[in-house]
Image: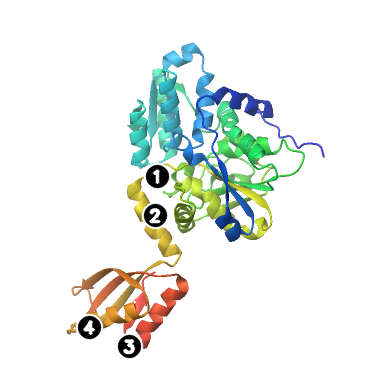
Amino acid sequence: MTPHTTSSAVMLADLYAARERIADRVYRTPCVHSEYLSDLLGARTFLKLENLQFTGSFKARGAYNKLLQLTPSERQRGIICASAGNHAQAVAYYGRALQIAVKVVMPRWAPLVKVSNCRNFGASVLLHGESFDDARAHAQQLAGADGHIYVPGFDDPHVIAGAGTLGLELLEDVPDMDAVIVPAGGGGLLAGTVIAMRSQPRPIEIYAIESFNAPTLGASLEAGRVVKVPTNPSLADGLAVAEFGSQCFQIVRHELAGLELVDEAQIASAILRLLEVEKTLVEGAGAVALAGALKIREQLAGKTIVLALGGGNIDVTVLSRIIDRGLRVDGRLCKIVARISDRPGGLANLLAVIAGAGASILEVYHDRHFGPADVARITVSCVLETQGPDHIAAVHKALLDAGVDASLDE
């Protein structure tokens, strides 16, 4: 079969040149087999661990490749970029290594760990706007006013080629792969992966995954052109772009086996699974690959697949909330609201029934102020650790069977 070629300003040769160029400072991350996920998905599953890059994400590849090709005069002028965090960290780190002054513009809601890392790498950090697109517009305005070189996060041939080096590694690490699942975002990683995969004489399916809160690629594919969409805050903050890269779109638009959108609960559950089972800390934008694969497991059954885990930069303060949300999605955490007698023994009876049903009580909130109309009764909320949805149903039934007026707080 003749290899399929994609019309693009970025060619396969550019990916190989980028790989050689960035090899001294960009880590070739492992691509590991997961027995657990293979069983769960019904497909032989590998994980590309880009969270192990020094700056915590695949963005290191494109940023370094871009900076290495700046002229001496461009380096002297200094550089500026806009980012939700991962691209900014990569530009800051490699800018320092190349002795280039770096300014980064990030949305006000950017994760604190990413802001802190940029400053630790020596960059000047400016928080501006409520979205990535607000930050990008401001960064481009500053570049024009101050003469800095603007370094795009995804829609740039050098950035795409650098990101595509990940695809080259996959072809060597898993030569028999049938499919690869990639976060969409602005499209740099997805476009680079398409170029790498389409160099092969046999078809390799490419699935793009994005958040329902930023359905950028989906809207563009439906319209047949790049369109701007409103975005909402997401656990996958690295994917929260309002407009897919135009160069990236031309590369990927006819090359995808599918596009899947995932919601916040699915992202949280995927983060939790990777942390708990694979002992791998992945941020929301990286975990969408697993969340998406779980949605299309029937299409993946029996195949050899790779999930691109794009990054691992996540605030520990946010992580605790994600874990709780993921446990709730899995049915391992629930909240029971009961209306009980305010007389002695009422609360003890409620807790005894819950304990008898095998649930662990994590929190109890005793509410006399906003209870039932009957002043002899009160509302009690209990957060429980359970074993899954069936166990939650069994606990609820035990309470009802015991005559307790109880409901599940959804």
Residue 367: % across, % down: 21, 73
Which of 302 and 241 lies nearest the eye of the viewer? 302
Marks 4 and 3 sit apart, C-alpha to C-alpha, by 12 Å
Name the amino acid, label 1.
Answer: Ile
The quadrant of the rendering that contains the N terminus is top right
Quickly name the residue at label 2. 322
Marks 4 and 1 sit apart, C-alpha to C-alpha, by 43 Å
Asked if the residue at tag 1 contacts the one at tag 4, i.e. Cβ–Cβ closer than 8 Å, the answer is: no
- Hey, which residue is sitting farthest top in the picture? 73
| Element class at badge 3 | loop
Q: In which quarter of the image is residue 340?
A: bottom left
Quickly name the residue at label 3. 403
Query: In the figure, 101 relative to 12: above or below?
Result: above
The quadrant of the rendering that contains the C terminus is bottom left
Q: Which labelled disc corresponds to residue 346?
A: 4
Residue 171: % across, % down: 66, 38
Marks 2 and 1 sit apart, C-alpha to C-alpha, by 10 Å
Which of 112 and 128 lies nearest the eye of the viewer? 112
In the picture, measured across the screen, residue 391 lies left or right of residue 19, that is left
Name the amino acid, label 3.
Answer: Gly
Asked if the residue at tag 3 contacts the one at tag 2, i.e. Cβ–Cβ closer than 8 Å, the answer is: no
Viewer can see residue 276: yes
Name the amino acid, label 2.
Answer: Ile
Question: Residue, x 52% and y 24% (percent of image)?
Answer: 24
Residue 375: % across, % down: 18, 82
| Element class at badge 4 | helix
Marks 4 and 2 sit apart, C-alpha to C-alpha, by 34 Å
Asked if the residue at tag 1 contacts the one at tag 2, i.e. Cβ–Cβ closer than 8 Å, the answer is: yes
Quickly name the residue at label 1. 314
Mark 2 crowd level (few <14, some 14–19, many ≥20, 10 Å Cα): many
N-terminal label among 4 and 3: 4
Question: Residue, x 19% and y 75% (percent of image)?
Answer: 368
